[in-house]
Image (cartoon, rainbow, N blue to C red):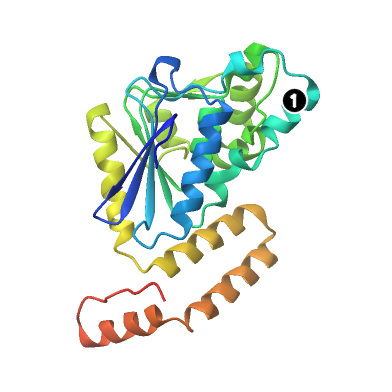
């Protein structure tokens, strides 16, 4: 399948690479791009050959925010329909791990997508921020809710109320990224992480992701209940039996995803 706004490629190491492809617009997030992202992730849900996804942009920008030209004449109703749209939450709702490989700018909606990803690799020249206040609005795709849980209230307030951006070192220190490296190394690092994830038992990876997200979205009591339910579920899988058997026999396990 061909896409207008994305470049999609499967890697034989068990993951797929999805690249935003509006470089002249710094990958501004138009509705068409978001809808295509949702469609491709939906396809990957049932693709056993894709156990992880690397999401990336261009050299200058992962995504520089929403497409302002698309929003210029929006009414309040238009804004609600645009931002309260499943396409903005496609990453968060994807069961398999997604790694963001971020070079250059990740601003506004771009950072809101990055914060939905499960692991993040940034370039040493990255700029991360939620500068919507400079346009007279606030983040509208989850930024005000996700950012405080990652960086804490004081810094989130400064970023959202004053438009402060973070560099690579700050992104690492405040928990927005796992790794920082040179721009030329970002994609390779993200793909190495994806390849490692693809070697793990897929069901355990999926429910592990679900449990960690439950810790962020639920009370401790409900989160512990989710963990126990999914822990018990894994004991009914072939992969659990294979993992235990391989450990006893001192060999590498062969995961089936069942």
Q: Which quadrant is home to the N terminus? A: top left
Classify residue 62 as left or right of residue 230.
left
Q: Which quadrant is home to the C terminus? A: bottom left
The front one of 245 and 124 is 245
Question: Above or below — where is 2 with respect to 235?
Answer: above
Residue topped by disc 1:
78
Residue 163, given in percent of the width and then of the height, sits at 58, 18
**Residue, far left:** 251
The front one of 239 and 41 is 41
Q: Residues within 10 Å of mark 1 (few under 14, many from 20)?
A: few
Residue 145, given in percent of the width and then of the height, sits at 66, 38
**Residue at the spot x=46%, y=60% of the render?**
46
Query: Which of the 4 image quadrants contains residue 178?
Result: top left
Classify residue 186 as left or right of residue 222.
left
Classify residue 158 as left or right of residue 104.
right
Residue 93, given in percent of the width and then of the height, sits at 57, 51
Question: Above or below — where is 134 with respect to 208?
Answer: above
The front one of 253 and 67 is 67
Query: Which of the 4 image quadrants contains residue 250?
Result: bottom left
Query: Which of the 4 image quadrants contains residue 173?
Result: top left
Count of marks, rendered view: 1
Q: Could you tell me which secondary element the residue under label 1 belongs to?
A: helix
Residue 129, given in percent of the width and then of the height, sits at 52, 24
**Residue at the spot x=22%, y=75% of the render?**
252
Question: Above or below — where is 145 with respect to 225?
Answer: above
Residue 146 visible in the current orientation: yes
**Residue at the spot x=39%, y=48% of the render?**
53
């Amino acid at each position: 399948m061909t896409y207008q706004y994305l470049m999609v490629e499967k890697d034989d190491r068990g993951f797929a690479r999805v690249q935003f492809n509006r470089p002249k617009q710094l990958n501004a997030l138009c509705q068409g791009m978001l809808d295509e992202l949702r469609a491709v992730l939906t396809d990957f849900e049932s693709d056993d050959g894709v156990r992880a996804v690397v999401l990336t942009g261009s050299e200058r920008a992962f995504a520089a925010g929403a497409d302002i030209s698309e929003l210029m004449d929006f009414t309040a109703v238009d804004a609600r329909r645009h931002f309260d749209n499943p396409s903005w939450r496609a990453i968060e709702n994807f069961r398999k791990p997604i790694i963001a490989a971020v070079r250059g700018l990740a601003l506004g909606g771009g950072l809101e997508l990055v914060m939905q990803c499960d692991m993040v690799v940034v370039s040493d020249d990255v700029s991360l921020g939620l500068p919507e206040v400079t346009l007279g609005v606030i983040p509208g795709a989850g930024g005000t809710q996700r950012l405080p849980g990652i960086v804490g209230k004081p810094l989130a307030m400064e970023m959202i109320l004053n438009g402060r951006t973070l560099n690579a070192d700050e992104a690492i220190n405040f928990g927005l990224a796992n790794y920082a490296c040179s721009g030329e190394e970002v994609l390779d690092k993200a793909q190495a992480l994806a390849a490692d994830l693809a070697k793990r038992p897929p069901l355990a990876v999926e429910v592990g992701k679900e449990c960690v997200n439950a810790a962020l979205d639920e009370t401790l009591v409900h989160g512990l209940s989710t963990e126990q339910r999914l822990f018990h579920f894994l004991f009914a899988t072939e992969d659990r039996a294979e993992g235990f058997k391989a450990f006893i026999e001192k060999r590498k396990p062969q995961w089936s995803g069942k």
